[in-house]
Image (tube, rainbow, N blue to C red):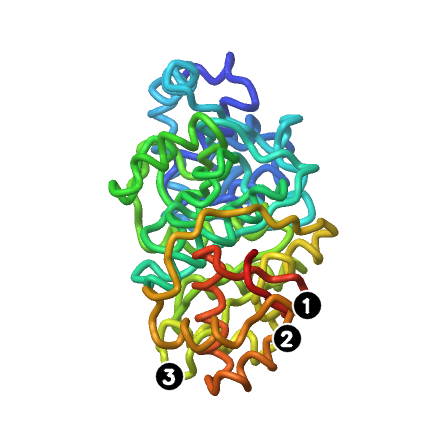
Amino acid sequence: MTSSTLNDREALYCLCHVPGFGSATIGSLKDTFGTYLSAWTAKGQEIQKAGILTERRAEVFLKSREQESTWRREFAGLDSKKIRFVAECDPDYPTRFLPYKNRPAALFVKGTLPENEVPAVAIVGARACTEYGKEAAGFYAGELANAGVNVISGMAAGVDGFAHRGAIERGKPTYAVLGCGVNVCYPRENYSIFQAMEENGGILSEFVPGTRPAAMNFPMRNRIISALSDAVIIIEAREKSGSLITADFALEQGKEVFALPGRANDPLSGGCNRLIQGGANMLLHPSDVLEYLGLKYERKLTIHKFSQNRLAKNENLVYASVDSRPRHLEEVAASCGLSMPECMEALLKLELAGLIFGTGNQYYKKAE
């Protein structure tokens, strides 16, 4: 061991590698011993007396110190891999984390960190999402990003990936929090997103480089997604979806939660509908979120992707019920004879197609 020349940040890096050590354990050790270095170099008797670790975990900890020289070499080589190590004590550690006891002790970053002063919104949802979910994720992410909001997600398949794409396609930064190492692209289908975020945005993780994705990592990842955000949007989630863990963390952290409504009999909307029933904000338009953030929604002209004669039955009914003067959502639904969820889904698709646009407060009119 060469701990005599170890500094506190290097000691924290080593602690992050100890099997079974998360931010809570590392934080408790620091609180007990005063510094990360003191915790890393504490004698076995001192560790046992502290009562933080079980006998077995203490043995693993002491055994792990044999890897110190290896981990120090890795630490020295992070720059060559374009990976930053951001410790809680560093000036660029996100201030959004500071109010929370379960904040990460350190982050590994490729690209940049989201600026503390810029509004941020998380968009998460089902991996096996529908076309409706894909369109909604990309649409809301793009509109929010265009309004100057940082889009945060988890780069998972489905909603997460389409949310990142929505911001990327607008040329705006977006940030992914991973449940694996920052040098591990998971899933592989999102590799183009992974590369784009290295150049415009960032990839973050509290897990050491090389960590493979594991089910137990994702709930831990979700608390970081919500902590980095001013509000969380849930787009398509089953009633026992992992996305609802993010919503729970957001509520615990005092963040606002928005949910995209769906059909009552659609399992992929069950979680969102339950959230709305429980008091979450119903998401109907980008202005719903922007108004909460104190930002103004400015409609950007879009190219019409579909002509009216290519619309599905429900979209045709809704399109025929909207005219050049703004009409309220309830008025449109009553006019076309559709249920509210069916009407909202059709309105979203028409807005994505550039055939209508929302004027705020659930009013819609035809595009000129």
**Disc 2: CA contacts within 10 A as few (<14), some (14-19) or many (>=20):** some
Q: Residue furthest left?
A: 188
Q: Are marks 1 and 3 in contact (CB under 8 Å)?
A: no
Say what amino acid the circle numbered 1 marks. Answer: Asn
Q: Nearer the viewer, residue 316 or 154?
A: 316
Residue ID at (48%, 59%): 355
Closer to the chain start, of discs 2 and 3, is 3
Tell me the number on the disc at residue 328.
2
Q: Nearer the viewer, residue 216 or 241?
A: 241
The residue beneath circle 1 is 361
Say what amino acid the circle numbered 2 marks. Answer: His
**Gap in angstroms between the C-alphas marked 2 and 3:** 25 Å
**Gap in angstroms between the C-alphas marked 1 and 2:** 8 Å
Q: Are marks 1 and 2 in contact (CB under 8 Å)?
A: yes
The residue beneath circle 3 is 265
Q: Based on the displayed image, in which of its 4 quarters is residue 93 positioned? A: top right
Judged from the image, the secondary structure of the residue bearing numbered disc 1 is: loop
Q: Based on the displayed image, in which of its 4 quarters is residue 89 positioned? A: top right
